[in-house]
Amino acid sequence: MTNTAIIGIGSNINAEENISNMLEVLGKEVEILKVSSLLKTKPIGIENQPDFTNGAVKIQTGLSREELNRLLKNLEDQLGRDRSLPKFGPRTIDLDIVVWNGEIVDEDYYTRDFLRESVQEVSNSVKSS
């Protein structure tokens, strides 16, 4: 079975380079259908850090949601994500499944305008759960 997902992207450490590298590696594992524009956003939570670059990527994959989530966490690790840092601290890359087969699965979608805009840019239609 083929699944379609939209993944939220964030980085505030060498963002352009890390997002580019992430897309290259991700594209070897799944089919990338569309990448949103990248937006600069202010940090949430811990404000004394560089602005983030955020966006979204729409993909198609034979992986299950759990398998895709593992792949994304491994990709974050490959790109140097330091999980010992605070949750809202600086990061090389942050990848989260926001939409799975047309259904919103990440609550951040409802509270972060930049995430909603990026998802809508790559999406045909999404329905709230």
Image (spheres, helix red, strand yellow):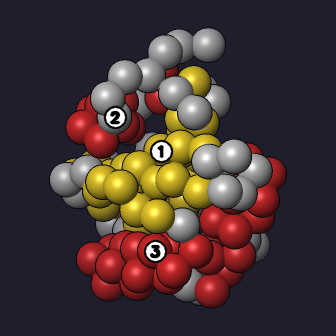
Amino acid, disc 1: Ile
Q: Given this view, does label 3 or label 1 mark the residue nearer the observer?
A: 3
Mark found first going from the N terminus, 3 or 1: 1
Q: Is residue 129 left or right of residue 59?
A: right
Instruction: Name the residue that disc number 3 marks.
Output: 27
Residue at figure coordinates x 47%, y 54% from the top left: 59
Q: Horizontal and vertical percent for residue 117?
A: 27, 33
Q: Horizontal and vertical percent for residue 70?
A: 76, 64
User: Foreground residue, 41 or 56?
Assistant: 56
Task: Tell me, yes or no, whether the two marked residues, 1 and 2, touch with CB atoms within 8 Å.
Answer: yes
Residue at figure coordinates x 41%, y 81% from the top left: 24
User: Foreground residue, 42 or 19?
Assistant: 19
**Circle 2 SS class:** loop
Q: Horizontal and vertical percent for residue 108?
A: 53, 31
Amino acid, disc 2: Ser
Q: Which mark is residue 6?
A: 1
